[in-house]
Every structure is written in structure tokens, then in C-alpha cells.
Amino acid sequence: MPRLSGFQTLEKFEKLIDDGVIPGNCTVSMYTSSDNPQDHRKSREFSTVKGYIVKPMDQGQAKRLVDFCLGGAGDRLYSQFKMATS
């Protein structure tokens, strides 16, 4: 979002959830260049944030993120992707 930090965006996003505009079962994984422990701690203040990944993301982190987002089905998807790109 223009002119908003990631944390400001999360505040607005969670307000939309509180107001019933967005379903309450949404989750967020932060993908950031900040490895500052204070930012990581601050991200835990948001109920929607379930992941905090510092750039650059390696292949293992990408696989875990996909697996998490797909509720454990990431292994199957990852295998199919790996075969398709080989």
C-alpha cells in the first residue's frame, strides 16, 4: 500500500477483519528485509501473522511456506513442481 509501512498495513487489515469486511480466518506471512528482533517481536502482536521470513528466502523456507499455506499438502505440490522444472 502506498505510504504505509507493513505494520500500518497489518493494522488496517486486522481492522477490516474486526469490522467483518474480511473473513477472520485469514493468515499473513511477512516477507521482509528486516532481521531486527524488535520487528519480529512486533509482528507477533498481530493475530493474523503466522510467519516471519527474512529475505532472501531459500528453497527450504519457500517449501515450508507453501506447505503451511496448503495445510500440509505442500510436499505433493513441491514434488510436482520439481519434476516439471527438471
Image (cartoon, grey):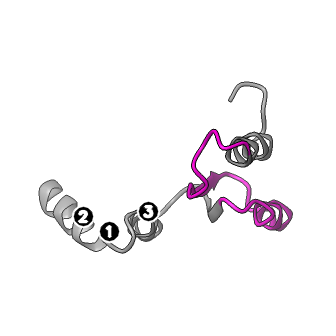
- Point out residue 50 in the picture as x, y percentages from the top left corner: 62, 66
Tell me: 11 left or right of 59: right
Task: Spot the residue most to the right.
Answer: 38
Dot in front, 2 or 3: 3
CA gap, disc 2 and disc 3: 11 Å
Which residue is located at x 79 percent, y 45 percent?
11
Q: Is residue 28 magenta?
A: yes
For marks 3 and 1 on the same chain, the one whose residue lies earlier in the sequence = 3
* Nearest to the observer: residue 53 or residue 44: 44
Q: Position of residue 60 (x, y in %)?
A: 42, 71
Q: Residues within 10 Å of mark 3 (few under 14, many from 20)?
A: some
Residue 4 lies, with reference to residue 41, above or below; the image says: above
Q: Amino acid at mark 1?
A: Gly
What kind of secondary structure does the magenta stretch mostly adopt? loop
Q: Are marks 1 and 2 in contact (CB under 8 Å)?
A: yes
Q: Secondary structure at mark 3?
A: helix
Q: Please, what secondary structure does the residue beneath circle 1 have?
A: helix
Q: Which residue is mark 1?
A: 74
Q: Residue at x 81, y 59 (%)?
A: 39
What whole-number distance in Å separates the C-alpha atoms at marks 3 and 1?
8 Å
**Residue 59: image location, x then y, percent:** 40, 65
Give, as a three-letter code, the residue at label 2.
Leu
Query: On the image, which quarter does residue 19 sit in?
Result: top right
Q: Which residue is mark 3?
A: 69
Which segment is the magenta one? 19-48
Residue 31 at what x, y percent from top left?
A: 60, 53
Q: Which residue is mark 2?
A: 77
Q: Amino acid at mark 3?
A: Cys
